[in-house]
Image (tube, rainbow, N blue to C red):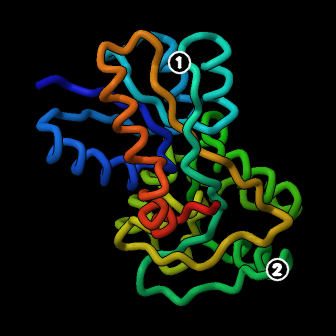
């Protein structure tokens, strides 16, 4: 038996955890994964802090950068595209966010707006760009609540949010979380869909098993799981 180590974007957390359970059941080998914003996960991987990494899941752009640098072995494996959506606490009436004007009104009425930290998270950057385009970034600044990733933002809202709290993050970080309700995708003009991809870290002592894990995550057989989690193809 051995330990397979994974660093993953929070957007892939639900599907990675599903594959972890299947992988351990089928192979008898344990898997440890850490999830967070893509920038933080990349920095941790290349910084060499913590256990050696075998599998890394980030945006396709960052995986390509790591392949070019030699940190990740040649071969990028795409999970699919992820859009950004709006959520509220479970049991709360869904606001109408179907247009720019209606989204602006809903956000102005929110007691808090929760989303990933834009310094390190793709979704956080998308939300800040949306607020800028809506012309309300300064107006709602004091009500913004940043979290390390969308999973953390949604879990906070599930426990601590009130009826007027709105969460915005990638769809795959909303749908798996009990205690929150998915409202809808952001209007198209505010979308910046990201493709998430996996790679095997060059020099992994468990390269064969790492590729097995990646194929379980990205093969055609995984599409129903990925679709249910919010991925698009």
Residue drawn where x is 16% and y is 33% of the image: 29
Residue drawn where x is 37% and y is 23% of the image: 54
Residue 196 is situated, as x and y percent measured from the top left of the image, at: 59, 44
Q: Is residue 102 left or right of residue 76?
A: right
Q: Is residue 172 above or below residue 72?
A: below
Q: Is residue 36 above or below residue 146?
A: above
Q: Is residue 162 above or below residue 81?
A: below
Residue 48 is situated, as x and y percent measured from the top left of the image, at: 43, 10
Quadrant placement of the N terminus: top left
Residue 34 is situated, as x and y percent measured from the top left of the image, at: 36, 35
Q: Secondary structure at mark 2?
A: loop
> Which residue carries the number 1 mark?
73
Q: In the image, which disc is placed on residue 53?
A: none
Quadrant placement of the C terminus: bottom right
Q: Nearer the viewer, mark 1 or mark 2?
A: 1
Asked which quadrant contains residue 26, the reply is: top left
Asked which quadrant contains residue 24, the reply is: top left
Viewer-proximal residue among 11 and 106: 11
> Which residue carries the number 2 mark?
99
Q: Secondary structure at mark 1?
A: loop
Q: Is residue 71 left or right of residue 213?
A: right
Viewer-proximal residue among 183 and 145: 183
Count residues near mark 2 (Cα–Cα under 10 Å), then give few for <14, some for 14-19, many for 20+.
Answer: few
Residue drawn where x is 63% and y is 67% of the image: 85
Q: Is residue 158 above or below residue 213?
A: below
Count residues near mark 1 (Cα–Cα under 10 Å), then give few for <14, some for 14-19, many for 20+.
Answer: some
């Amino acid at each position: 038996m051995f330990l397979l180590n994974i660093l993953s974007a929070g957007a892939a957390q639900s599907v990675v955890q599903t594959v972890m359970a299947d992988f351990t059941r089928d192979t008898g080998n344990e898997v440890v994964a850490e999830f967070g914003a893509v920038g933080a996960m990349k920095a941790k991987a290349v910084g060499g802090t913590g256990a050696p990494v075998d599998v890394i899941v980030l945006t396709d752009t960052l995986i390509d950068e790591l392949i070019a640098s030699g940190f990740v072995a040649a071969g990028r494996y795409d999970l699919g595209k992820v859009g950004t959506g709006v959520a509220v606490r479970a049991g709360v009436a869904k606001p109408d966010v179907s247009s720019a004007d209606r989204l602006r009104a809903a956000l102005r009425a929110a007691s808090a707006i929760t989303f990933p930290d834009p310094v390190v998270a793709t979704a956080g950057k998308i939300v800040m760009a949306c607020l800028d385009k809506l012309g309300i970034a300064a107006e709602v600044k004091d009500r913004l609540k940043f979290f390390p990733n969308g999973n953390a933002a949604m879990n906070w809202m599930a426990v601590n949010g009130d009826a007027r709290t709105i969460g915005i993050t990638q769809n795959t970080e909303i749908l798996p979380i009990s205690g929150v309700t998915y409202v809808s995708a952001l209007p198209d003009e505010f979308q910046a869909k990201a493709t998430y991809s996996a790679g095997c870290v060059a020099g992994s002592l468990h390269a064969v098993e790492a590729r097995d894990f990646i194929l379980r995550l990205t093969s055609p057989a995984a599409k129903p799981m990925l679709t249910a989690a919010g991925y698009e193809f």
